[in-house]
Image (spheres, rainbow, N blue to C red):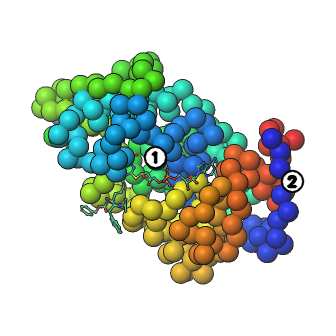
Amino acid sequence: MSLDLILPDSLVKAFKTARHVTVFTGAGVSAESGVPTFRDAHTGLWARFEPTALATPEAFEADPALVWGWYEWRRSRVMRAAPNPAHEAIVRLARHVPAISVVTQNVDDLHERAGSRSVAHLHGRLMQPRCFACGTPWRYPDGMPNEPEDGRRVTPPECPECAGPIRPGVVWFGEPLPADEWLRALGAAAGCDLFITVGTSAMVYPAAELPRIAAGQGARVLQINPQATALDSLADWNLVGAAGVVLPALIGAVFDDASPTTG
Ligand code: BV8
Ligand code: ZN
């Protein structure tokens, strides 16, 4: 579906004069790929659990099969998904600006599958599991996990080094962010002159600090989200709509670089 966007001149100018653009994404950017947003991911077996309660080391210790099952269900959805026009538009944007940084809260690999390079994953990567006890990296067997629609408990595999349980390569609540990725994200927020926040409710910290750090450093802030968020008042521009529709139309309109889907 193509969208004829009426863009404020100030926004077009901000894009055309940008030296360094930082794109900050959340679950909403993967929603149109069929990957449930964090709030939508607790259906079926997990419906009676708060996602912020499930995504904790305590929940994994209390019931490893429940939590591992949840992540196998989410991994099966991510592996069946494909990047959408929002992911692709971010790749195209990189061609039109001197410098771009992509910082995501998403644990899926759709930015990379679309072609984005050196994406900072603040909350880890679903595809990089490791041992809960000794930290030894582990590799999933090839092939798609075949998880029932409503999910099921799955006993975590055993670590070949210490026989401890394998855990998903994500950052759980109460756990620190990976220092190198966080430092890269801080640099991207502090060093950009245009900060684009796409598809995030900006409720989880310290990630949600990044838009404020960017604005505090004088960057202009563009928000793309179909719903209101805590960033509405911080943003210089709020484009209300789905990322997979608004982003390609925006890049098409500003840089006359229409994607195959908006031609
Ligand atoms: C830590 C990985 C310390 C796992 C995730 C300050 C204040 C208050 C609380 C805290 C604070 N500092 C720390 C905390 C505690 C906590 C926190 O923030 N709690 C919240 C709930 C208040 N933070 C932590 O625990 C962090 N760690 O602080 O450690 C420490 C330091 C040193 C030593 C020891 C400890 C770790 C946080 C990371 C948790 N892991 N993910 C997993 O995925 O299972 S967070 C997870 O939830 C996601 O990664 C993401 O960050 C968040 C979900 O948010 P969104 O991505 O925005 O998704 P959501 O569903 O909320 O919204 C979707 C949005 O998209 C909506 O706005 C919707 O309108 C929009 N949308 C929908 N469709 C579309 C769309 N937009 C565009 N297009 C569409 N089509
Ligand atoms: Zn181990």
Who's the residue at 57% across and 31% down the image? 81
Mark 1 element type: loop
Please tell me the numbered disc located at residue 38.
Answer: 1
Q: Amino acid at mark 2?
A: Asp
Label 1 amino acid? Phe
Residue 66 versus residue 97 in the image, above or below:
above
> Is label 1 within 8 A of ligand 1 (CB to nearest ligand atom)?
yes
First in residue order: circle 2 vs circle 1: 2
Image-quadrant location for residue 87: top right
Location of ligand 2 given as a quarter of the image: top left
* Distance from Cα at disc 2 to Cα at disc 1: 30 Å
Left or right: 79 as drawn, with respect to 125: right
Q: Is residue 137 visible?
A: no
Q: Residues within 10 Å of mark 1 (few under 14, many from 20)?
A: some
Q: Residue furthest front?
A: 48
The residue located at (59%, 75%) in the rendering is: 234
Element at label 2? loop
Closer to the camera, 103 or 262? Answer: 262
- Residue 175 in percent (x, y) is at 27, 55
Q: Which residue is mark 2?
A: 4
Does any portion of residue 16 appear in the rendered image?
A: yes
Question: Which quarter of the figure has residue 30?
Answer: top right
